[in-house]
Amino acid sequence: MNGVTPGLPLTGERTVPGIAREQYWFARHEVVYRWLAARCAGASVLEAGSGEGYGAQILHEAGARVVAVDYDAAAISHSAATYPLPHVRANLAALPFDRMDAVVSLQVIEHLWDLAGFLREVRRIADWTCLSTPNRLTFSPGLARGAKPTNPFHVEEFDADQLRALLDAAGFSEVAIHGVHHGPRLADRPTLLAEQIRAALNDTWSAELEQYVATVTTADFQLCAEDLDNSLDLVVIAR
């Protein structure tokens, strides 16, 4: 199926389920929620930047008490109509909560103009947090630290050392970083990312590429704490 989810356009700013050509990106994001889910069981969790809402639903199904929070009115409206969870529209740098066990914010911090303000809010309300973001070194090769990304939706992109420094400065005393990597099947097709980008920009998807991308699942990705500089995405657990 191609196109959009009902009521929520696929803008390039966030991924959504159910679109064949988007399945690589969806699975790449979904795998982190699946990896995190057991850790969240029984916890009160605020998902900051919940987007379409599928991630909050995954955590809810794993036993977390989830509140989905996003600043985008269309995203909150769609998510609230799709998933039976509490939803709040709010600025992530001024969260309207006093206490949660955890704040989960995946593929969000690269979009934030006031990242320091958001991290202060996370420290204020939560015992621990899980953050993920594209690894600047592989997502935008050659982009210098602090330089404006070419992705129009990104304010800044980060490497692992930057993330550790940001979290240290925000007062987190324990920081563990994992990386998302291609598993063996995707690693055997090293041009896959370039193929998808070229196809999307030119609207020239071959039947073979579209069929291949549609088969990608969370099993095609791995998380580990080694070789962070070559990872696709960085995943932080901090407290």
Image (cartoon, grey):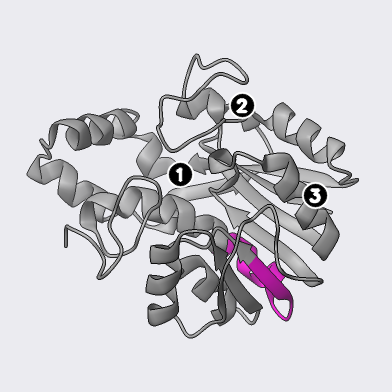
Q: Which structural element holds mark 3?
A: helix
Q: Quadrant of the C terminus?
A: bottom right
Q: How many labels does the image show?
A: 3
Let me know if residue 189 appears in the view: no
Q: Where is residue 37 in the image (x, y as percent from the top left)?
A: 62, 69
- Which callout, 1 or 3, points to the residue nearer the camera? 3
**Circle 3 sits on which residue?**
120
Q: Nearer the viewer, mark 2 or mark 3?
A: 3
Work out whether 82 lies above or below 170. below
Q: Label 2 amino acid? A: Asp
Check the image and report above or below for 16 versus 223: below
Which of the two discs, 2 and 1, sits closer to the camera? 2
Whole-Å distance between the Cαs marked 2 and 3?
A: 27 Å
| Quarter placement of the N terminus | bottom left
* Residue receiving disc 2: 229
Specify the amino acid type for callout 1. Answer: Gly
Q: Give the range drawn in magenta.
A: 34-46
Q: Residues within 10 Å of mark 2 (few under 14, many from 20)?
A: some
Residue type at mark 3?
Arg
Q: In which quarter of the image is residue 5?
A: bottom left
* 140 vs 121, nearest the viewer: 121
Element carrying mark 2 = helix
